[in-house]
Image (cartoon, grey):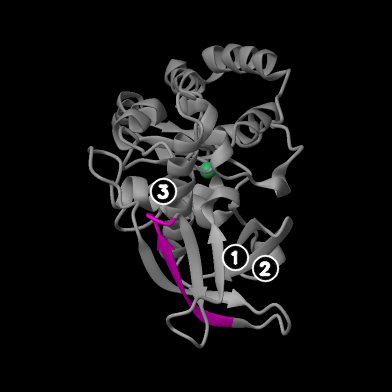
């Protein structure tokens, strides 16, 4: 049995763990995760979570982590993610991460090949009024044949607004909208950029709308730019302008700290711990 507790007082060891954001691990799935994701993983339907540094790690559990790990989990649980489906990144909002983790590990949506629902969709969203800025429940309809998103107010047959998929962009803007599930939809009409602010109380539903709009955009782009490689189309599906200019932080001293850690680990703690750490490092610490 190896107790990680002994490491918590070592400043440079702390820097390493925190720098890599892998303070936690799901010992049911066998992946290393950050604090934020650990809250979503810690459910009866997904599994048990342990602190990498503070909990006891029995030998068998370390072996289990080594036998699974983030890369293998990715191969298994992300085997058939549709190309348009949005995989959240570190800086993305919590609702995208939460629903991604649930889709991946709880509902296992991408483990096997299947037809992902991408056609027409109809449902209710709370939409912010243009003048009074109050949110009202509105019926939204997406028509794949017309490539139009429409919403209705009092007249159930004549849409109040029609949004062409051609110029549509969607991005989560929780702070701006004042709701954690807030989605901003922008589009061009009469040579002007317009926007809609919507949300749905159910995180699964708003993320389903987001991915449906992404699927619609992907289909449109494939038709509009035939022969263009998929990898070039994917970044054009939707863009998060609020994150523009952000650059991932890289730690130039990580290798040096890793070397120190290895020396310290080998002489003072024992090989199993350094083995676990190197395994963690090799697996790239891909969260979620
Ligand atoms: Zn995470």
Which label's residue is closer to the chain start, 2 or 1?
2
Which label's residue is closer to the chain start, 3 or 2?
3
> Is 138 displayed left or right of 62 in the figure?
right
Which label's residue is closer to the chain start, 3 or 1?
3
Q: Mark 3 Cα within 10 Å, few/some/many (few <14, many 20+)?
A: many
| Residue drawn at the location 29% of the way across and 52% of the way down | 107
* Marks 3 and 2 close (CB-CB < 8 Å): no
Give the answer, above or below, for where 196 lies relative to 49: below
- Report the predominant secondary structure element of the magenta stretch: strand
Give the answer, above or below, for where 260 lies relative to 195: above
| Residue drawn at the location 65% of the way across and 46% of the way down | 240
- What number is the disc on residue 177? 2
Quadrant for residue 113, please give it: top left
Asked whether mark 1 lies closer than 8 Å to ligand 1, one says no
- Name the residue nearer the viewer: 277 or 282: 282
* Marks 2 and 1 close (CB-CB < 8 Å): yes
- Name the residue nearer the viewer: 12 or 237: 237
User: Is 171 covered by the magenta stretch?
Assistant: no
Q: Position of residue 60 (x, y in %)?
A: 28, 30
Give the answer, above or below, for where 149 lies relative to 116: below
Q: Start and end of the magenta stretch?
A: 136-146
- What number is the disc on residue 101? 3
Q: Position of residue 2 (x, y in %)?
A: 42, 30
Evaluate whether residue 55 shows in this view: no
Residue with the mark numbered 1: 182
Q: Secondary structure at mark 1?
A: loop
Q: Mark 2 Cα within 10 Å, few/some/many (few <14, many 20+)?
A: some
> Is 115 displayed left or right of 14 in the figure?
left
């Amino acid at each position: 049995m190896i107790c990680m507790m002994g490491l918590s007082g070592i400043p440079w060891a702390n820097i390493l763990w925190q720098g890599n954001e892998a303070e936690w691990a799901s010992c049911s799935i066998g992946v290393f995760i950050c604090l934020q994701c650990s809250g979503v993983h810690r459910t009866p339907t997904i599994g048990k979570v342990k602190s990498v540094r503070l909990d006891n790690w029995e030998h068998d559990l370390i072996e289990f982590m080594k036998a699974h790990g983030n890369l293998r989990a990715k191969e298994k649980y992300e085997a058939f993610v549709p190309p348009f489906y949005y995989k959240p990144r570190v800086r993305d909002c919590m609702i995208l991460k939460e629903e991604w983790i649930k889709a991946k590990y709880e509902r296992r949506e991408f483990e096997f090949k299947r037809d992902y629902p991408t056609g027409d969709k109809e449902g209710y969203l709370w939409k912010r009024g243009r003048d009074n800025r109050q949110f009202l429940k509105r019926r939204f309809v997406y028509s794949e044949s017309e490539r139009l998103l429409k919403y209705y107010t009092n007249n159930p047959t004549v849409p109040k607004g029609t949004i062409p998929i051609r110029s549509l962009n969607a991005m989560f803007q929780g702070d701006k909208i004042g709701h954690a599930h807030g989605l901003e939809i922008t589009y061009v009409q009469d040579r002007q950029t317009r926007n809609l602010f919507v949300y749905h109380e159910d995180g699964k539903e708003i993320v389903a709308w987001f991915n449906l709009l992404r699927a619609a955009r992907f289909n449109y782009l494939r038709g509009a730019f035939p022969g263009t490689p998929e990898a070039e189309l994917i970044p054009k599906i939707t863009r998060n302008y609020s994150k523009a200019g952000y650059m991932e932080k890289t730690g130039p001293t990580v290798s040096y700290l890793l070397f120190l850690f290895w020396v310290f680990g080998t002489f003072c703690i024992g090989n199993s711990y350094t083995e676990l750490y190197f395994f963690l490092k090799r697996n790239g610490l891909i969260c979620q």
